[in-house]
Amino acid sequence: MNTVLITGANRGIGLEFVRQYAADGWCVFACCRDPAAARELNEVAAGHADRVSIYPLDVTDHRQIEQLSHTLADEAIDVLINNAGVYPPEHGDVFGKTDYSAWVHTFEVNTMAPLKMAEAFIQQVARSRRKTIITLTSKMGSVADNRGGGSYIYRSSKSAVNNVMKSLSIDLSSRQITAVLLHPGWVRTDMGGPNGLISAQQSVTGMRQVIDTLRFEDSGQFYAYDGQIVPW
Ligand SMILES: NC(=O)c1ccc[n+]([C@@H]2O[C@H](COP(=O)([O-])OP(=O)(O)OC[C@H]3O[C@@H](n4cnc5c(N)ncnc54)[C@H](OP(=O)(O)O)[C@@H]3O)[C@@H](O)[C@H]2O)c1
């Protein structure tokens, strides 16, 4: 059976990943900060009790990441999805009003956690069939695509994780592990807001198709949810 581990699985894009992979017969390790408060995730898990399990995980807590890796030590993880992300408060992300402590926190979640997850779960990914690490980034991290300016904190956190994952793809190539960056589109979630162009369902359907058709030669690429390559 295919197995996927998803961070930030309690709402938005992460929850939709859980829904779709569970419906498709995958074994899902769904991670979120507060499982007891994750009503919708618990409902999905109850509908697939044999295959969906929920684990507490704050991705900035490296000890908790290591403990979870220990708990799942004997598993194989086909696809590790670094989905958890934050968007800093808008008022602290404009020139002259930069919230530097929010910047540090955003880097911890958006940039550092994906590498820590890869470090912690490398054995489980390496022993799987698909051997894939996916990190949710954003077109806002594309330097080539930056025509709007501003958003220093969010943009830099995603540009940085792009380079982190590029290096990872090179470092893990000898182990035949595929590491890819995905832009989910502008999605109607708490982060994307109500004006987003697509639903979480459309975004995740597209991203799952991209993931499904990935080949090892695609490692290190930056794709959008519709399969288009995004310029760095
Ligand atoms: N929506 C968009 O238009 C869009 C566009 C480009 C990229 N993205 C990226 O796509 C990913 C998912 O976004 P989304 O729209 O689904 O966002 P969302 O609705 O705001 O959900 C964010 C998820 O990340 C979790 N999270 C935040 N900090 C965490 C931490 N320290 N530890 C563990 N989980 C944490 C949240 O958990 P809590 O409920 O506990 O806070 C929540 O489950 C993010 O990486 C985001 O940057 C989204």
Image: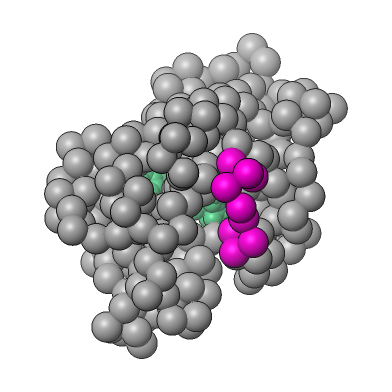
Extreme-front residue of the structure = 174
| Rendering colour mode | one colour
Q: Residue at x 18, y 37 (%)?
A: 63
The residue lying at 44 percent from left, 35 percent from top is 174
The dominant secondary structure in magenta is helix
Left or right of 191: which side holds 77?
A: left
Name the spot of residue 204 as percent of width and height, x first: 61, 65
Q: Is residue 124 left or right of residue 99?
A: left
The residue closer to the viewer here, 180 or 131, is 131
Count the labels in the image. Answer: 0
Q: Is residue 92 visible?
A: no
Q: Where is 138 relative to 40, above or below?
A: above
Dividing the image into 4 quarters, which one contains the C terminus? top right
Q: Is residue 230 above or below residue 153?
A: below
55 in the magenta segment = no
Placement of 131 over or under 44, stated as above or below: above
Q: Is residue 194 left or right of residue 100?
A: right
Span highlighted in magenta in the image: 211-219
Percent of width and height locating residue 138: 65, 41
Is 112 above or below relative to 118?
above
Residue in the picture at 52% in, 75% down: 20
Q: Write the residue at 47% across / 51% down.
A: 132
